[in-house]
Amino acid sequence: MKKQGKPKLAFFDFTDCEGCQLQFANMGEALLQLTELVDIVNFREIMSEAGEDYNIAFIEGSITTDNDVKRIKRIREKAKVIISLGACATIGGVNGIKNRTPLEVAKQRVYGDKADSVNTIRTFAVHEVVKVDYFINGCPVYIPEVISVVKCALMGKPYVVPNYAVCVECKMNENVCRYEKDQECLGPVTRAGCNSWCINYGNKCYGCRGLVDNPAAAGQKDILQKYGLKLEDILQQFTLYNDAMGEKYDKEFKQ
């Protein structure tokens, strides 16, 4: 019987800052332990080689050009497992701000008289273009969750992304509510899984993990009323990361 080799991992980036890959590269001892179980064949942050023989592909970044679409489909055909890494890949991220306006208007604002020469489409999360097997949310990704997802992927087990609000984790960590400090926070409507990371260190939740499936809308309205905030204020905050969701690639650009 032929002995199976180690799974081969590759990292690819699209429209992003590569911050989530940098988080992965900074895992320290956990990364060294991982290399005992897998072969990393493509990872620009830590190596110069770029192998094309891989089983598991980590994708950072959103899909924003026709070339991106072709490239992610080629990766999907080759990889047995696709893992979306970070907010840009899972929900479109900051790049989704482009989706607030008609594409031609957005191009004109950014590129001016060179707009017609730019190849760009509306921003899509990776799973809106190809099938994704695992999601690691956040901006940047939360290392304990990264490790959990990698373990599941290597064992062939599902990873269930938490589907309750960040407020749950915040309460468990005994944090003082940011609203009590006169600061809007998106924790009541944002998907958990980060262990209320930002709030633990004195910041607020920016919604980088995306909207929880069934947000407590009434509860959020009660919070707004209690602290004298307007709904528009919260919506404006939420669009920092979440403008890209809602449209499937094939709906507008079926090939």
Image (spheres, grey):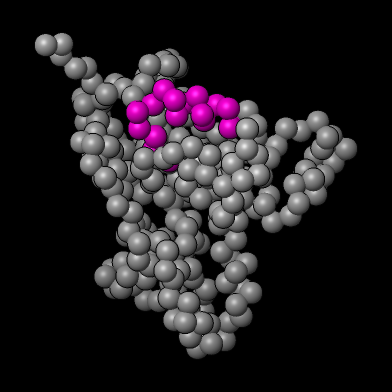
Which image quarter: residue 148? top left
Which image quarter: residue 70? top right
Residue lying at 38% horizontally and 16% vertically, measured from the top left: 53
Which image quarter: residue 5? top left
Inspect the magenta stretch and tell me whether residue 86 lies in it: no
Q: Position of residue 120 (x, y in %)?
A: 70, 37
Dominant SS in magenta: helix
- Relative vertical location of residue 173 with respect to residue 101 in this rendering, above or below: below
Inspect the magenta stretch and tell me whether residue 82 lies in it: yes
User: Taking 19 as reference, is 150 left or right?
Assistant: left
The answer to whether residue 202 of the structure is visible from this angle is: no
- Relative vertical location of residue 252 with respect to residue 81 in this rendering, above or below: below
Q: Position of residue 122 (x, y in %)?
A: 66, 45
Residue lying at 35% horizontally and 56% vertically, measured from the top left: 194
Q: Quadrant of the C terminus?
A: top right
Q: Quadrant of the N terminus?
A: top left
In-front residue for pair 213/16:
213
In-front residue for pair 151/226:
151
In-front residue for pair 72/199:
72
User: Magenta region: which residues?
Assistant: 68-84
